[in-house]
Image (cartoon, rainbow, N blue to C red):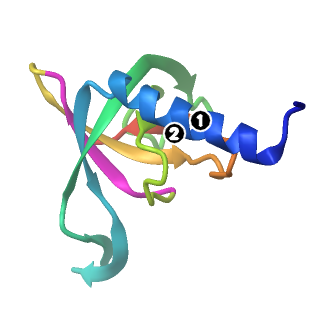
Amino acid sequence: MGLTKERLLAQVQQIRSEAAIFLSDTITLLRVTGDTVVNGESVPVYASPEVLDCRIINRSGDNRSSIAAQFRAVKQSFYDTNYRIQLPFGTQIKIGDRLVYNDGVEEIKLEAVFIPIQHDLMGAFVIGAEKVA
C-alpha cells in the first residue's frame, strides 16, 4: 500500500476541491489578446472580462530609487505594491494579463508578473501581481 501516482493524484484532486473554500474574494480577469496602436502608442487589447473566485493572500511593497535618472525622471522614488493571489487551479492566465480587484474601498488594477507552471501534483495555484496605474 505504498504511494502510487494514482493515489497521489486522488489526494491532489481532494486538496484542490477543498482549497476552493478559501476563494472568498472575486477578481476580474482581462486577458491580453493583442495590441493596437493609438496615436503612435501601443495599447493592449483585452478579451471580454471574466469574473473569478480568488483569495488575496498578502499585499507587500518595495521602495526603489532612480538616482541615475534624477534629472530625467518625474520622480526619483517609486513604490511597487505586490500581491499574491490564489486562483482556481486550471485558470488560463499569462504574464501581462490584467486583474481588477475591488476591496470595498477602491478598485485596484493589477498586472500578472509571476505565473507558476501548473502540473498534475499542484494543489493550489498562486500567482504574483503588481499594482498598475
What residue is rendered at 55% in x and 40% in y? 13
Q: Mark 2: give few (<14), some (14-19) or many (20+) Cα within 10 Å.
A: many
Identify which residue, 42 or 75, lies in the foreground: 42
Identify which residue, 50 or 74, lies in the foreground: 50
Q: Does the magenta stretch include residue 98?
A: yes
Q: What residue range appears in magenta?
A: 95-103
Q: In the image, is 38 to the left or to the right of 33?
A: left
Q: Is residue 9 magenta?
A: no
Can you tell which mark lies on residue 111? none
User: In the rendered image of this protein, does residue 28 appear above or below residue 77?
Assistant: below
Q: Can residue 40 be seen in this view?
A: no
Using the rendered view, name the quadrant where residue 43 is placed. Answer: bottom left
User: In the rendered image of this protein, does residue 5 appear above or below residue 82?
Assistant: below
Can you tell which mark lies on residue 123? 1
Query: Picture coordinates of residue 68 (x, y %)?
Result: 63, 36
Q: Split into 4 quadrants, where in the image is the C terminus?
A: top left
SS at badge 1: loop
**Nearer the observer, disc 2 or disc 1?**
1
Q: Residue furthest front?
A: 1
Query: Picture coordinates of residue 48 (x, y %)?
Result: 18, 68
SS at badge 2: strand
Can you tell which mark lies on residue 127? 2
Q: Is residue 21 visible?
A: yes
Q: Mark 1: give few (<14), some (14-19) or many (20+) Cα within 10 Å.
A: many
Identify which residue, 129 or 23, lies in the foreground: 23
User: How far apart are the alpha carbons under marks 2 and 1?
Assistant: 13 Å
Q: Are the residues flagged by discs 2 and 1 in contact, CB closer than 8 Å?
A: no
